[in-house]
Amino acid sequence: MFTVLLGAALPLIDFFIVNVALPSIDRDLAAGPSLLELVVAGYGLSYAVLLVLGGRLGDLFGRRRLFLAGMAAFGLTSLACGLAPDAWTLVVARVAQGAAAALMLPQVLATIHASTTGARRAKALSLYGATAGLSMVTGQILGGVLVAADLAGSGWRAVFLVNVPVAVAGLVLALRTVPETRSDRPAPVDVPGTLLLAVALLTLLAPLTEGRAAGWPLWTWVSLAVFPFAAGAFWWVERRADRRGDIPLVPPSLFDLVPLRRGLALVLPLSGGFGAFMFVIAVALQQGLGLGAVASGLALVPMAVAFFGASLAGPRLVRRWGTRVVPVGALVQALGLGLLALTAWRSWPDLSVGSLLPGMALAGLGQGLQLPVLFRVVLSEVPPERAGVGGGVMVTTQQTALTLGVATLGTLFLSLSASGSTATALTVTLLIQLAMALVTAVLALRLPRTVG
């Protein structure tokens, strides 16, 4: 369990660890806004696009084998990022790193799902949820510490190079401890579905992540116009394959499972708001207030501690209260976001890390009551032979939402900051995230009352 959770933590930490390193990367490599966006977006795009395929390959060739391949590739691509001599090399290495993460991460949920049952699965999924949420928060904390420490003069490069020994340790542990599992009826790779899903995600995410920095050129609008047609073509191809008795990349029949369908509908606003929050806080504290990387990371510690505590308490709370824990968590998160918005509005520019503590802790507590439970809900009725596909669909939804959150609310925050005050920009984006948390609370009432 420790080994597969290590594999779950690395990709999520790396999505966020780079946020606090961007100013240093810009100074060292003269990257400019557009290439800096690509350093973040290139990883997120390849990661999101290939996740479902990674799950299918694990079902087909064996999840342990793909986990090992993904861990090795992640270590090598992290080394390439850390040694990159220029900005474009870093962008290419980040794209490759995202692809390696997409091979590794779906095998974690699939291995848990295929090799545990009952109470052990519930505990394992809660630990996975705790690890996922904690990784996203601690990524920025760790990034701030590493950049400030400037180990052996490495500066920002340490945020990537630190992955190399961890990946080596993960490989050694996985060879000794991770069991081999695969689908009893593995399906061949769905080439048309894979290509169409890639086109759909790219035409949506690429213009949203790159549009602002590039000045919204014509290709961004053409790409967004293509997206609904690509998404519609993907769904039509998958439905036709399902009706023929083939096994498509994302079987539409999977969405007949009510817990999966309704759980994914909640993962979207929750993860989107979370991704935006982490990006906006990093920029507001470092560029708006002029705090250092360590101080901006320390501001997130109360959130990390509260999230972890709530995640560990989740299984016990779910046994007693069922999925009603989720709307309660959403309301607690909304209260925390409201406190943060009020604090930012009243205290700026004298905002301190200490003044953010109550809001951070409440927001983390609320998220910790939601995310691990939703992971359990989504996968509760997925059959073991579809564990890879089910896990791939869920983490693709989560990763797409994280990227969309950064692209949309992050862009809004940067635009408002450029045209007005950072305090107003931060308050507005926090209030929008509060509204998203309230929507999540309402939608959560439709979840099945109990979790299998």
Image (cartoon, rainbow, N blue to C red):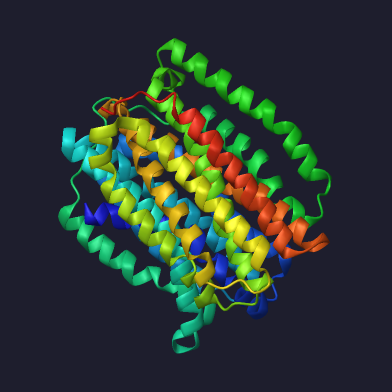
Q: Do we see residue 117 in this rendering?
A: no
Q: Position of residue 409 (x, y in %)?
A: 66, 49
Q: Is residue 215 left or right of residue 332?
A: right
Residue 388 visible somewhere in the drawing? yes
Where is residue 322 drawn, in percent x and y?
A: 30, 31
Q: Is residue 27 left or right of residue 182?
A: right
Placement of 256 over or under 15, stated as above or below: above
Residue at image x 62%, y 52%?
430
Q: Is residue 428 above or below residue 150?
A: above
Residue occupying the point 43% across, 47% down: 366
Residue at the far bottom in the pictured view: 152
In the image, taking residue 331 as reference, residue 219 lies left or right, namely right
In the visual, does 386 lie left or right of 12?
left
Q: Does residue 450 lie above or below 30 as drawn? A: above
Q: Which residue extends farthest front?
A: 346
Which quadrant holds the C terminus? top left
Question: Is 30 or 432 nearer to us in this picture?
Answer: 432
- Indicate the position of residue 317 as horizontal and vertical percent values: 27, 40
Q: Residue furthest top?
A: 243
Tell me what residue is drawn at x 66 percent, y 39 percent. 204
Q: Position of residue 107 (x, y in %)?
A: 32, 44
State the image quarter where residue 349 is shown. Answer: bottom right
- In front of the other: 250 or 275: 275
Q: How many marks?
A: 0
For the point 26% across and 31% down, which residue is it? 183
